[in-house]
Image (cartoon, rainbow, N blue to C red):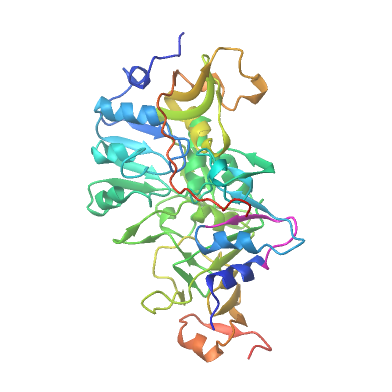
């Protein structure tokens, strides 16, 4: 039984610490906000210029001047502050954000990340992703372990244009959790019912297996 | 000198020309200068280079200028919400320069502040770094990025006074304050144009020195891209 998107988000939420300023990317990372552990107080930063993001609005609360970086309507909290895009990226690039949780197309065993374009096919842009991975202290990736066609996404080298070099600290997929440091990647957790052998078959990247993981 | 104009078309008079570079504020469709974009379309100005974080959607925002092929080049960080844009780009009908969002914001801020270049670690080792000067500071590698200015900046604020002082609201602020500083001519449209003295000087986000022309917005749509709600009581 592989991890669901919710399971992956719940696991990522365990990386949160009390007092953290956090930036959540679009897609599965947005779900992490639903699983913030009890007793942990974190402040969500939205790179379009908001610190202290509240929940989605009710119908009555919708405000076109108040959106998150995924362009979804959102609400503010009593502690919220607003600022310009340059101030926002000053926070990000300046190392003031503790944790960034992002999606990915590909990750390499050295922690390289590709998540912004497929040459000749898809042109969306990097948005704030390159700034986030360059400036935020810890980068956690949430992604499906394999692409829809079954190909590996956790690779020796990314073959798509990079978002950042050696920037990823942790990868959480539907089958397990890997940490990455200067010594390479290590599989440290398995989703229920998933075997190390199965992960090896579905992964191109080289990785060590943490002691005690069977 | 009077800064107020009757409408967007009047405010654009005498400042547009083919091949010009514009900046347009906004993040997605939030905080975009709606009236001014429509007036720029109606001006018929061609071969525009547009510096804007996004490209609007097919039928709103800068998407209106893409439909009419008035834009020859976009400088943006994310254009994923505009299918016509993607089509024109993949067909090589439109030039595109992607900038990381924070680099784009800082290039505009720098341009407005008289800083021709700066170093950032964003994008080191990626396509963005190709052809750019690299320099090490304290053992870490950075790339040089240049400041940006525009012939005309189009910005949107919540309130403004007749002196051009601007106040933004919530996340509609985004790129507008920096772009206001980086236009050779900056035109602001505001939801409430008030008399001098009605804004608290301590609450002004952009000083009137950066704004040459100002208009009261009319018939704002303020379209929402992704209306996301939670159930009552949830």
Outermost residue toward the right in this view: A39
Q: Looking at the picture, tell me which residue is in the foreground, A118 or B184.
A: A118
Asked if residue B115 shows in the view, the reply is: no
Residue at 53% x, 31% y is: B177
Magenta segment: A14-25
- Is the C terminus of chain A in the top left, top right, bottom left or bottom right quadrant? bottom right
Q: Quadrant of the N terminus of chain A?
A: bottom right
Pick whichever, A93 or B170, lies toward us.
Answer: B170
Q: In the image, is B45 to the left or to the right of B210?
A: left
Q: Is residue A125 left or right of residue A107?
A: left
Quick check: can you spot residue A79? yes
- Where residue A106 appears, as percent x and y from the top left, is 45, 70
**Percent from the top left, x then y, of residue B58?**
31, 44
Q: Position of residue A130 (x, y in %)?
A: 50, 55
Q: Which residue occupies 26% across, 46% down?
A: B94
Q: Is residue B197 above or below residue A130?
A: above
Which residue in the rendered view is the most extreme toward the front? B232
Total count of labels: 0
Does the magenta run of residues contain A167? Answer: no
* Residue in the foreground of this view, choosing between A73 and A186: A73
Quarter-wise, where is residue B39 in the image? top left
**In the foreground, B25 or B223:** B223
Identified at 54% across, 41% down, the residue is A85
Q: Position of residue B141 (x, y in %)?
A: 55, 56
Instruction: Tell me the chief SS of the magenta region.
Output: loop
Give the residue at x 50% y 61%. Answer: A27
């Amino acid at each position: 039984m592989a991890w669901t998107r919710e399971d992956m988000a719940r696991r990522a939420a365990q990386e949160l610490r009390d007092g953290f300023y956090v930036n959540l990317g679009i897609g599965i990372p947005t779900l992490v906000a639903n699983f913030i552990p009890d007793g942990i107080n974190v402040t969500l930063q939205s790179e379009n210029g908001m610190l202290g993001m509240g929940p989605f609005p009710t119908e009555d609360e919708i405000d076109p001047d108040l959106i998150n970086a995924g362009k979804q309507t959102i609400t503010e909290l009593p502690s919220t502050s607003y600022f310009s895009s340059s101030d926002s990226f000053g926070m990000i690039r300046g190392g003031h954000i503790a944790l960034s949780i992002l999606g990915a197309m590909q990750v390499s065993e050295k922690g390289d990340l590709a998540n912004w374009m497929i040459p000749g096919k898809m042109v969306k842009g990097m948005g704030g992703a390159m700034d986030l991975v360059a400036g935020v202290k810890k980068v956690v990736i949430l992604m499906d372990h394999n692409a829809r066609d079954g190909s590996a996404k956790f690779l020796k080298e990314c073959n798509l244009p990079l978002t950042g070099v050696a920037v990823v600290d942790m990868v959480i997929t539907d089958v397990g959790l890997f940490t990455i440091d200067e010594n390479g990647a290590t599989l440290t957790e398995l989703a229920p019912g998933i075997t190390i052998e199965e992960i090896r078959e579905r992964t191109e990247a080289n990785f060590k297996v943490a002691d005690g993981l069977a | 000198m009077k800064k107020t104009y009757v409408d967007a078309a009047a405010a654009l008079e005498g400042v547009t020309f083919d091949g010009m570079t514009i900046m347009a504020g906004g993040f997605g469709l939030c905080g975009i200068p709606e009236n001014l974009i429509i007036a720029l379309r109606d001006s018929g100005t061609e071969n525009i280079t547009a510096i804007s974080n996004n490209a609007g959607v097919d039928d709103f925002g800068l998407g209106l200028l893409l439909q009419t092929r008035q834009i020859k080049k976009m400088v943006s960080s994310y254009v994923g919400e505009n299918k016509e844009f993607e089509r024109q780009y993949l067909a090589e009908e439109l030039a595109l320069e992607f900038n990381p969002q924070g680099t784009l914001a800082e290039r505009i801020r720098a341009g407005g502040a008289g800083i021709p270049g700066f170093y950032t670690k964003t994008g080191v080792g990626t396509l963005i770094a190709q052809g750019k000067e690299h320099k090490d500071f304290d053992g870490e590698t950075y790339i040089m990025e240049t400041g940006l200015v525009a012939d005309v900046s189009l910005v949107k604020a919540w309130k403004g006074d007749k002196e051009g002082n601007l106040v933004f609201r919530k996340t509609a602020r985004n790129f507008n304050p920096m772009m206001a500083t980086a236009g050779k001519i900056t035109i602001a449209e505001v939801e409430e144009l008030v008399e001098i003295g009605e804004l608290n000087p301590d609450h002004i986000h952009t000083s009137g020195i950066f704004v040459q022309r100002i208009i009261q917005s009319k018939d704002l749509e303020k379209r929402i891209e992704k209306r996301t709600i939670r159930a009552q009581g949830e």
